[in-house]
């Protein structure tokens, strides 16, 4: 038999539509004390909830429940679906402008401890049970960057038991409360941002903290994309960002100069942007498409960043391409051979190359100063890399 007491905020009540349970449950008498002054004596009131399972069912004792001064009864309703017990309780008639507090107790028959995963009262989690606390152990032991992907099914199992039809904001609140109920320091929090259309602050996600070697890193829950829309009923994994890159705008249109530049440094190269190459090779639409397909098959290109056009300026065709991982000298050599094969020349009157270097995390401002000191660099700007965990 387990007894759990938790503190919960009663700043707002969430209500849900009634869903019939697979089993029939009913309440024993709902008992409550007369209108009392708060025992907590706090401006922002907190309440204490005891959850206890008996032979009859689940027993709830809710201390210092906020009601209006005119209350004469407490109305309690509930739903029980997929191991999630949602309880709504409210004082009646709930019309006065003053408030006081009452201790409420009741039992819901026909529910055993092994059936219940989570209990919510007025939208706040008051109980979470995992058999032998195994999920607690599994979740907490995986609270690091290397193993956090193992928690994805645990989180999705919890989300599957949430009420149907709730808003994304309610989902975020459920997740924040549940994640912070683990015995380890999850430090879950709701993320806020400014809506770009309406200019108002709004919730947009949930983040937790995990260990990354000696760094405590914030990572965001990455909600699943289903039918081209964000689905807030499950997550696909996590995402996080590192300030470990810098964009350097060179004055070089010739790729040989770019290769010489990157070979003089010890940094890995994330990407070379702005490649524009003219070809004198005879070509039609079919030939151009074959060239594009061959370029996309290279290990140092990306499908979305290779395109071309026929009869572009004085060339038979032009290729626009970004190159990746080009610190690899084998890749550099292969690209030079490819230029010969397809009769490519650098478009010297075209855009200049931008090189994106990988740098030590957090050193972007330092390297902005260093790179802008080169006479062939127009500007340098630190940037962030988005990492995905699945």
Image (tube, rainbow, N blue to C red):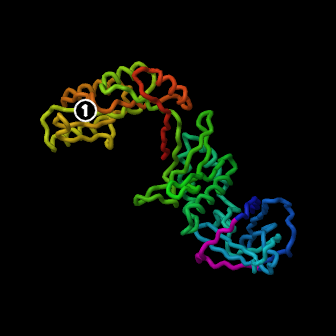
Q: Magenta stretch containing residue 22, yes or no?
A: yes
Q: Give the number of callouts.
A: 1
Of 282 and 31, the residue lying toward us? 282
Asked whether, in this view, residue 280 is left or right of residue 266, the answer is: left
Q: Residue 173 lies in what quarter of the image?
A: bottom right
Seen in the picture, residue 216 relative to 378 is either above or below; the reply is below
Q: Nearer the viewer, residue 8 or 368?
A: 368
Q: Residue furthest top?
A: 264
Reply yes or no: does residue 96 show up in magenta: no
Looking at the image, which residue is at 38% across and 21% down?
Answer: 261
Q: Main secondary structure of the magenta part?
A: loop
> Residue 44: horizontal and vertical position, in percent?
78, 59
Stretch in magenta: 12-28
Q: Secondary structure at mark 1?
A: strand
Which residue bears the numbered disc 1? 277
- Residue 134 in view in this figure: no
Q: Nearer the viewer, residue 236 or 316?
A: 316
Asked which quadrant contains residue 122, the reply is bottom right
Residue 187 shows in the view: yes
The residue shown at (81%, 72%) is 98
Q: Quadrant of residue 346?
A: top left
Residue 161: where, in percent of width, then height?
A: 57, 64
User: Where is the N terminus found, in terms of image quarters?
Assistant: bottom right
In x, y percent, where is residue 111?
Answer: 67, 72
User: Would you call the spot at circle 1 few (<14 residues within 10 Å), some (14-19), or many (20 or more)?
Assistant: many
Which residue does the image show at 56% across and 65% down from the upper left?
A: 167
Q: Height in image: 350 above or below 81?
A: above
Q: Would residue 114 appear left or right of 267 to someone viewing this image?
A: right
């Amino acid at each position: 038999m387990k007894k759990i007491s938790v503190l919960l905020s009663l700043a707002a009540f969430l209500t849900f539509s009634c869903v019939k349970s697979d089993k029939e449950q009913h309440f024993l008498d709902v008992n409550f004390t007369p209108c009392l002054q708060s025992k907590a004596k706090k401006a922002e009131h907190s309440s204490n909830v005891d959850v206890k399972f008996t032979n009859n069912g689940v027993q709830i004792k809710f201390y210092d429940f906020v009601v209006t001064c005119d209350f004469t009864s407490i109305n309690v309703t509930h739903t029980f679906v997929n191991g999630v017990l949602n309880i709504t309780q409210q004082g009646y008639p709930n019309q006065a402008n003053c408030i006081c507090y009452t201790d409420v107790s009741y039992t819901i028959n026909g529910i055993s401890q092994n059936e219940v995963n989570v209990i919510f009262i007025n939208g706040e989690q008051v109980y979470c049970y995992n058999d032998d606390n195994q999920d607690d152990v599994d979740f907490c032991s995986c609270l690091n960057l290397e193993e956090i992907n193992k928690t994805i099914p645990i989180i999705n199992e919890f989300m599957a038991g949430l009420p149907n039809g709730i808003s994304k904001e309610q989902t975020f609140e459920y997740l924040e409360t549940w994640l912070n109920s683990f015995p380890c320091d999850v430090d879950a929090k709701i993320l806020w941002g400014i809506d770009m259309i309406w200019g108002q602050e709004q919730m947009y996600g949930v983040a937790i903290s995990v260990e990354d070697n000696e760094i405590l890193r914030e990572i965001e829950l990455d909600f699943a994309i289903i039918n081209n829309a964000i689905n807030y009923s499950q997550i696909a994994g996590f995402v996080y960002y590192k300030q470990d890159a810098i964009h350097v705008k060179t004055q070089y249109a010739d790729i040989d100069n770019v290769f010489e530049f990157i070979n003089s440094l010890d940094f890995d190269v994330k990407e070379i942007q702005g490649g524009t190459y003219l070809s004198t090779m005879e070509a039609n639409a079919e030939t151009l498409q074959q060239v594009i397909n061959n370029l996309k098959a290279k290990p140092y290109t990306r499908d979305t960043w290779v395109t071309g056009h026929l009869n572009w300026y004085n060339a038979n065709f032009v290729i626009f391409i970004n190159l990746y991982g080009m610190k690899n000298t084998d890749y550099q050599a292969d690209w030079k051979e490819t230029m010969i094969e397809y009769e490519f020349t650098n478009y010297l009157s075209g855009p200049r190359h931008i090189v994106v270097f990988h740098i030590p995390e957090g050193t972007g401002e330092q390297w902005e100063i260093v790179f802008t000191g080169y006479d062939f660099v127009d500007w340098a700007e630190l940037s962030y890399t988005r990492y995905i965990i699945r």
